[in-house]
Image: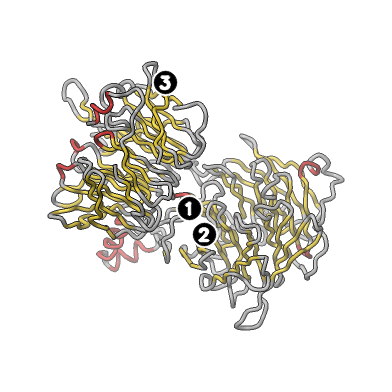
Amino acid sequence: MVKLAEYSRTATFAWSHDRIPSLVTGTVSGTVDANFSSESKLELWSLLAADASEPTLSLAVDAKFNDLDWSRDDKIIAGALDNGVVELFSKTEDSLKSEGSFARHNGSVKTVSFNSKQNNVLASGGSKGEIFIWDLNTCLKNSKDYTPLTPGNATTPIDDVSSLAWNQSLAHVFASAGSTSYASIWDLKAKKEVIHLSYASPNTGLKPQLSVVEWHPANSTRVATATGSDSEPLILVWDLRNANTPLQVLAKGHTKGILSLDWCKQDSQLLLSSGRDNTIVLWNPEKAEELTQFPTRGNWCFKTKFAPEAPDLFASASFDNKIQVQTLQNLTNTFDQEQTATKQQESETDFWNHVSLEESNEKPQVMHLQAPAWYKSKSPAAQWAFGGKLVHITADGKGVIITKPTISGLEENKVLDA
Amino acid sequence: MPTIANAHNDLIHDAVLDYYGKRLATCSSDKTIKIFEVDGENHKLVETLVGHEGPVWRVDWAHPKFGTILASCSYDGKVLIWKEENGRWAQIAVHAVHSASVNSVQWAPHEYGALLLAASSDGKVSVVEFKDNGTIAPLVIDAHAIGVNSGSWAPSIIQEGPGAQQIRRFVTGGADNLVKVWKYNQEAHTFVLEESLEGHSDWVRDVAWSPSILLRSYIASVSQDRTCIIWSQEHTGGPWKKTLLQQNKFPDVLWRASWSLSGNILALSGGDNKITLWKEDLQGKWEPAGEVQE
């Protein structure tokens, strides 16, 4: 695969919002590493660093992480810690620094999410249905006495909140999901849960757990949820104006419960999912089409995210002790074919001698080749030709015009080009 | 001058006239390439080339001394070579060394032979020579880590002095916001980095090396950051001078840059659907030379 980097950590992560992004990782809770270490670290990795075995920056943290998020202005990194603490960090040129830690949750903190419009607003979700809304401007000044807000009353039973997502256009609306069969839509202006979603399987009649929520990048009434059910792993796309039935059901991509979703901010026709079947799938959620199935990992893939400002890349974290950064596209080329041809010439002995040494060269399986929106030029693509002619594409993008522009004050140009 | 409406069913990404201005090649998100014969105000569709499995981004005509040959590149990761003989078009070669979208193709100055430069989102550029007896092993070069958006050849120049030789150079623009100049190294049998030019703050969408060999070398680079930079070099090996085409940012993303064949007029295509023309004044400042209206 076109693996840009691989970090040998069992960790959760968050991307920075740069064109050449960095990644912060935090030792994930619920696992024991190879050295039986209980240490937890927040680490920073530069994508283009020559050596991917050591982080650029590192900071010891009191507890392990369940989740990380990085504010859109890249100023604050928020960590959801297993010991009930929400900890805020900042990054300088040469260090990672804790800006404050807040033991407000009664159980472990499962997830943190920065508001998509206001960089100072953070939501955190924990066990026992606890959701807190934080104003960083206030809490960083007064870390002792700060009490976060609660979003108001729930109308559905809420247990562990392991997924939170802010609406991409309305700063006061967010969604939560976790261990129950309900996903909730909250309105901070109304101070309550305003809509809930649940899905009764037509096959079993049962309502599966809705484990993840993710908003459409532009359409404020559209939201996706995924089921955590191993028997019926589905991604459901809803329009909230009809919250009874999903608009689209994305099935047959995963074989076990889904743990992560990411709807691409630059192209609403791209959505990444990953889960307990150790796989990552790229979808067109608007056509309910599976686009690409990425090579299977060694264990559950619990977080998969596009690099927010370089969406040709995504990172995925798995309990196989690796965070991988790879490209969306990784087609088979002639070099791969030559390699396969060479392998077929090998003797049986050579084959078995080589087999354990080789890195997996498995390619993603492409079901539909769909070019991302950011590839498509939206310009007249003007190009000069002989004779001072200029060829360009029409405004509707579907026609071509050949002109011979007159250049002000440059008559001799015609002579040269003729 | 002709207007060809609804040439394709989906967005057209490139349209190029051949050497004689008689044939127009267009390529589109509909995965096809179309060849039109153009004569005065008239045009006629002569062929639709089908073979790519994804949107076709760019096409380029080879010099006529090699025959009627067209190269095309696509999101499917392939460069296809097409040839017309006795009125029949056929796909004659596949260049598939890339593992992601190939975003630009350009034939080298004809003095070098049938040599093609391809730039890919897999971070590499490839240079491949098509010989009469088939394809030789291509050179594949790691160019821009997060993807290469465009590549453009320098015009053919001969280094003066004893043992005069061609200086083969090209420029690339990438998703790492950089513009890089590459030069062929005889000993290494490959292209090596000559200069990495920093100036853009976002993806470089297109680079174009001026075909003029009269004065200095000029490279235009356009970017997602809504600027165009003119890079100029007095003599090979000298420093590259950076000039912002205009101080103010353009109203939208700049996608394409093209030099007139004499090398002194630059055409820029923007996301606002405008084409602006530029020329250098005697003081070395760039000034508007018109706008192309539909």
Q: Position of residue B149 (x, y in %)?
A: 40, 43
Quarter of the figure that contains the N terminus of chain B:
top left
The answer to which image quadrant residue A159 occupies is bottom right
Residue at 60% of width from left, 62% of height from top?
Answer: A260
Residue A16 placement, left or right of B277: right
- Residue B85, compared with residue A137, is above or below; it is below
The answer to which image quadrant residue B87 occupies is bottom left
Q: Do discs 2 and 3 share a chain? A: no
Q: Give whichever of A412, A24 is nearer the camera.
A: A412
Q: Are marks 1 and 2 in contact (CB under 8 Å)?
A: yes
Q: Do discs 1 and 3 share a chain? A: no
Residue B51 placement, left or right of A379: left
Answer few, some or many: residues within 10 Å of disc 3's Cα (few below 14, many 20 plus, some between 14 and 19): few
Q: Are marks 2 and 3 in contact (CB under 8 Å)?
A: no
Residue B69 placement, left or right of A254: left
Mark 3 highlights which residue?
A: B285
Mark 2 highlights which residue?
A: A269
Please, what is the three-letter code of the amino acid marked with disc 2?
Answer: Gln
Answer few, some or many: residues within 10 Å of disc 1's Cα (few below 14, many 20 plus, some between 14 and 19): few
Residue at 20% of width from left, 21% of height from top?
Answer: B160
Marks 1 and 3 sit apart, C-alpha to C-alpha, by: 36 Å
Which numbered dot is residue A373? 1
